Image (cartoon, rainbow, N blue to C red):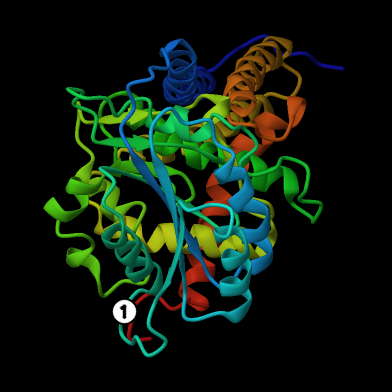
Amino acid sequence: MYFSFEITQLQWTLLQSALVLVLLALGVFVSRVLAVKRAARRSAEYEISDGCENAAVIVYSNDDAGDLAALLPQILRQAYPAEFEIVVVNEGDSPAVREMVSTLQMTHSNLYLTSTPDGARNLSRKKLAVTLGIKATRMPVVVLTTATAVIESDKWLHTMCRHFIPGSPTEVVLGYAAAPPYDDRAAGARARSFDHVAESAAWISPAVKGRPWRGTGHNMAYRREVFFRNKGFSRHLNLRDGDDDIFVSEIARPGNTMMELSPDAFVEIPGANSPHVYRHRMARRRFTERFISRRPHVAGTTGFTAYMLAPLPAIAAGVMSPANIFIWIACAGVMAVWCATGMIWRPAVTALNGRRLLLTLPLLAATRPLRKTYTAIRCLIRPDKRYTWE
C-alpha cells in the first residue's frame, strides 16, 4: 500500500477551518454553561431572610381540577415568613374547579377563586386570567405558576420571594421550570431533553449577565406595581402568547432582575417534553421572539451551527489523502476536541435537571440546528393559531 506524507495547503486550510469552528462553538458553549453554573452557585449562596414582603401566588388553570387538587396543597403548605394568599384564575366557570377549591377554602382562608368571562372574545385567555388574578390581590409581590406545575419543596415561595425585601432594587425574579427527565419515553426523548436545557440556557445566560429577555410562565415573580406601570400586556394584546417572553423583555432590566436557580425554587412540569407539547412550545417561542427587540440567543445559534459544521472540513481533508497517516492523526485530534466541546454541556444538564446523556451529548449538540430548522419548516407548513382573532 502506498502511503503519502505530503500535506497540501488546501488540507491545512481545511484542518484550520475545522479547528476555528470548534473553538468558536467552545467559546459559546462555555459562556452558556458557566452562566448557568454561576446562577446556580449564586442562588445556593444567597441568604434567606425573614424580611420578605407579603405575596400572592397567581395560579392559572384551564379547567385543570385534577392538577389543582395536587398543586394547591403543595402551595398551602409553604413555609413563608410573611403573609401570602393564593388566587386561582380559571378559564371560564368550571363546576369541578369551583367544588375542589371550595372544599379547600373551608380550612384555608387565604385561598381565592376567580374566572375569566365565558364570552370573552379577541383576547388572550391566559393574559386575561393573569391580569384578573393580579387585580384581585393587594399583595405587593405576585408569583406566577400554572395548575400543571408540581412543587416539591415547601421553601419554593420563600426562595422565589427572598429577593423582594424593603430597599432592594429587585423587581423581577425569574425561576426555572424543569421537565421530569425520564417521564418522556417517546422517540427522540433524549434530543428533546437536551433541547430543553439548551433552550433554557439561551435565556438564563443573558439574565445572569444582566441582559434578561425571557422567563417561564410556570415560575416567575414580580412586583405588582411593575405590572401596572407597564400597563400590563397592553402592547401585545393581539397575540395569544407572549406573557412570559415579550412581557418579561419589557419589564426586566439590568439591576432589577434576579435569576433564581436554587433547587428549592424549581417547579416541575410533567409532560413538558412530550412530542406534542414540545412542538407547540417551540413553535410558540419561535413566533413570539420576533416581537422582542433584545435577542441575545443569536450567539447560541451561531455556536451550534459552528459545532455542526466543524467536522466537515476535517473529514474532507482526510478524504483528499486517504493514505496519509498525518492527515488522519490531525483529523483525530480535531474530532477529540470536538467531542470534548460537546461534553461541556454536562454541568448545565445536571444543574437544570436534564436527562443524563453522557456520550450522546456531542451528537445531540451537533444536530440541534437541524431540529430547529425542521421546527421552522413545520411551523410554516402547519402554523398554529397565534393571534387572538384566529
Would you name the residue on which mark 1 appears?
Answer: 123
* Residue beneath the point at 53% across and 20% down: 15
Circle 1 packing at 10 Å, graded few (<14), some (14-19), many (20+), is some
Between 279 and 329, the one nearer to me in the picture: 279
Q: Looking at the rendering, in which quadrant would you find the N terminus? A: top right
Whole-percent x, y for residue 138 in the image = 26, 51
Q: Secondary structure at mark 1?
A: loop
Q: Residue furthest bottom?
A: 119
Quadrant of the snapshot with the C terminus: bottom left
Residue 139 in sight? yes
Task: Name the spot of residue 112 as percent of width and height, x first.
Answer: 45, 61
Q: Is residue 295 left or right of residue 385?
A: left
Residue at the spot 63% in from the left edge and 17% down from the top edge: 340
Up-down relation of residue 5 to residue 110 (above or below): above
Can you give x and y, in whole percent of width and height, for residue 131 in the image?
30, 64
- Residue at the outermost left position: 229
Q: Residue at x 63, y 64 (%)?
A: 103
- Closer to us: 187 or 45: 45
Q: Is residue 201 left or right of residue 367?
A: left
> Where 198 falls versus 72 (above or below)?
above
Q: Considering only vertical position in the picture, is 270 above or below 238? A: above
Q: Position of residue 38 (x, y in %)?
A: 44, 16
Q: Residue at x 36, y 40 (%)?
A: 297
